[in-house]
Amino acid sequence: MTAEATPPSPETATPLLLERLDGGVALLRLNRPEATNALSLELQALLSRRFTELAADDSVRCIVLTGGDKVFAAGGDITSMAGAGPIEITRRHTERVWGPIQHCPKPVVAAVCGYAYGGGCELAMLADIIVAGEGARFCQPEIRIGIMPGIGGTQRLVRAVGKAKAMRMALTGRPISAHEAWTAGLVSDLVPDAQVIPTAIELARGIAAMPPLAAEQIKECILLGMDAPLEAALAMERRANALLFASHDQKEGMAAFIEKRPPKFEGR
């Protein structure tokens, strides 16, 4: 007589965990430790779904994305790609899966400990701010298995670190340290490994306390303006700034400043 296997707990069985923290912060944690958080098709679909839900949730003002205190994500799931052909890869439409993350209107903070390799590096680059531990490493190793980055690794990387460093990373497949990533401008904050998630949450709470309409407009203007001619980007900025003068939060923020009291932003 054989004993029944103990069923996995809901937490260990779920590849993506969501925790709602106080202060308007949502914490998303990749949860495939047995596979170093490799981005399986199931995990990618869950990320897409969660970001869609959180974008529409007015109680959430900032999102923290992490893989935990050991590894962020060690890339795509190679076993699901090894035998695939170009039509199957095309029909996966990764641009649709990753779209809700790319177009999330709310600020996103990535908390990176350990490896952020391949798709993991590309996922981190979708965040607006990256907080990295001193032991973190970033890499686009796709060339070593006969392919190339396919979800933003060539395009976002060059915009983040410039042509020379992007070429070196993508053409050699060699990782860079967290300090190198910070020096290059890929990483926003460099902290001790044990402080990565607390620092990211504290940063997210500070952002969540700001007026959400202003945060949304700032994020949109920075992202759209990066690839626009300067005059067009400046015109977009002026219009976005003027639009905010129709908001309750602008009136509240300026009144609070004049009255020397803390503002209370409501997102309207």
Image (cartoon, rainbow, N blue to C red):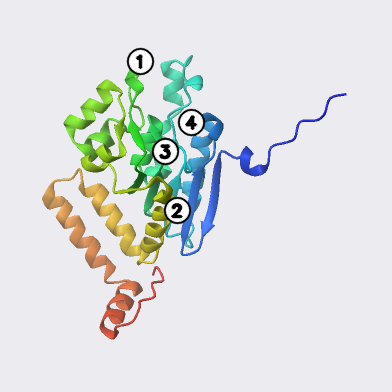
At 41% from the left edge and 71% from the top edge, which residue is drawn? 266
Which residue in the structure is indicated by mark 2? 55
Secondary-structure class at tag 2 = helix
**In the rendered image, the vertical position of residue 203 relative to residue 194, given as above or below:** below
The Cα–Cα distance between marks 1 and 3, rounded to whole angstroms, is 23 Å
Label of residue 138 in the image: none
Report the amino acid beneath label 4.
Ala
Could you tell whether 78 is left or right of 237 in the image?
Answer: right
Report the amino acid beneath label 3.
Trp
Indicate which disc, 2 or 3, sits on the residue closer to the N terminus. 2
Residue neighbourhood size for the residue with mark 3, other residues' Cα within 10 Å, grouped as few (<14), some (14–19), many (≥20): many
Secondary-structure class at tag 1 = loop
- In the picture, which quadrant includes the C terminus? bottom left
Which residue in the structure is indicated by mark 1? 146
Indicate which disc, 1 or 3, sits on the residue closer to the N terminus. 3
Residue closest to the eye, 141 or 196: 196
Which residue in the structure is indicated by mark 4? 38
At 35% from the left edge and 44% from the top edge, which residue is drawn? 132
Residue closest to the eye, 88 or 188: 188
Residue closest to the eye, 211 or 29: 29
**In the rendered image, the vertical position of residue 58 relative to residue 37, given as above or below:** below
Residue closest to the eye, 14 or 45: 14
Give the residue at the far right of this rendering: 1
| Residue 222: image location, x then y, percent | 24, 51
Which residue in the structure is indicated by mark 3? 98
